[in-house]
Image (spheres, grey):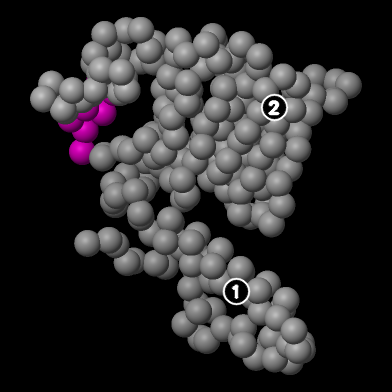
Amino acid sequence: IYDQRKIDENENNGVLKKFCPHHLVNSESKANITCLVYSHDGTELLASYNDEDIYLFNSSHSDGAQYIKRYKGHRNNATVKGVNFYGPKSEFVVSGSDCGHIFLWEKASCQIIQFMEGDKGGVVNCLEPHPHLPVLATSGLDHDVKIWAPTAETSTELTGLKDVIKKNKRERDEDSLHHTDLFDSHMLWFLMHHLRQRRHHRRWREPGVGATDADSDESPSSSDTSDEEEGPDRVQCMPS
């Protein structure tokens, strides 16, 4: 945390406070924060870590203080995930996941109270709540933005939640055995797949391009087809 009124480069490089879950300080996992937000009154900090959990810190605590809450169940690996508070007084925590679902936790209890399929493309990245109304906007790899509101007449059953949580945990554990970098094979595969889709749609929008031309331009080579079919595990490139 930096305080613009008190930045002194000669003292701790201008940093006012630093927070990190203690088990990640010297961890070999090299977890990175993909999103950080303040609560409505600035008393709390919410941080989402790649291939880790979501942590809540009290912004008034001393430098190096431990987190006060931890939120589990989702997965943050394939793309950069956002996280946010939900509710007029930041009563809830909301995040997307690699599994394409939106997770909503009660902040105080850390319990998942809502679980929705938010993206058919497989990843929900961005979540923005309305400042006053109980409305939430989300986006991911799908070519649209979805608006959510609490209009259901019956309570949510959370069907399939346990299976999704187990799957997310299993995939995270398996990946941790092979690599720990942020830009791993899953990230690379998702980006390549998404760019290929965008190129296809852009080609169709160009004037004078017929179905034959578009199909010819987008006909995958044998290697591209192999990559698509075998999925993210096929990609072996790693950043230097």
Q: In terms of depth relative to the viewer, which is nearer, 70 or 65?
A: 65
**Which residue is denoted by mark 1 in the rendering?**
199
Q: Position of residue 19 (x, y in %)?
A: 29, 20
Q: Mark 2 points at which residue?
A: 130
Mark 2 or 1, closer to the camera: 2
Reading the chain from its start, which is encountered first: label 2 or label 1?
2
Estimate how packed mark 1 is, as few (under 14), some (14 to 19) or many (20 or more) residues with alpha carbons within 10 Å.
Answer: few
Please tell me which residue lies in front, 167 or 51.
Answer: 51
Q: Residue 95 carries which label?
A: none
158 falls in the magenta region:
no
Q: How far apart are marks 2 and 1 (CA)?
A: 33 Å
List x then y, in percent, for residue 10. Answer: 11, 25
Q: State which quadrant residue 117 falls in.
A: top right
Q: Do the residues labelled 2 and 1 touch (CB within 8 Å)?
A: no
On the image, the x and y values in percent for residue 216 come to 65, 91
Q: Is residue 187 left or right of residue 9?
A: right
Question: Residue at image x 56%, y 32%?
Answer: 95
Residue that protrudes farthest toward the front in the picture: 5
Quadrant that contains the N terminus: top left
Which quadrant of the rendered structure holds the C terminus?
Answer: bottom left
> Is 21 in the magenta?
yes
Q: Main secondary structure of the magenta part?
A: loop
Q: What stretch is highlighted in magenta?
A: 19-28
176 or 46, which lies in front? Answer: 46
- Where's residue 116, x and y in %? 69, 35
Q: In this view, does 26 lie above or below 210?
A: above
Amino acid type of disc 2? His
- Residue positioned 26% across, 28% down in the render: 24
Q: Is residue 96 above or below residue 114?
A: below
Task: Check the image and name the residue furthest to the left.
Answer: 10
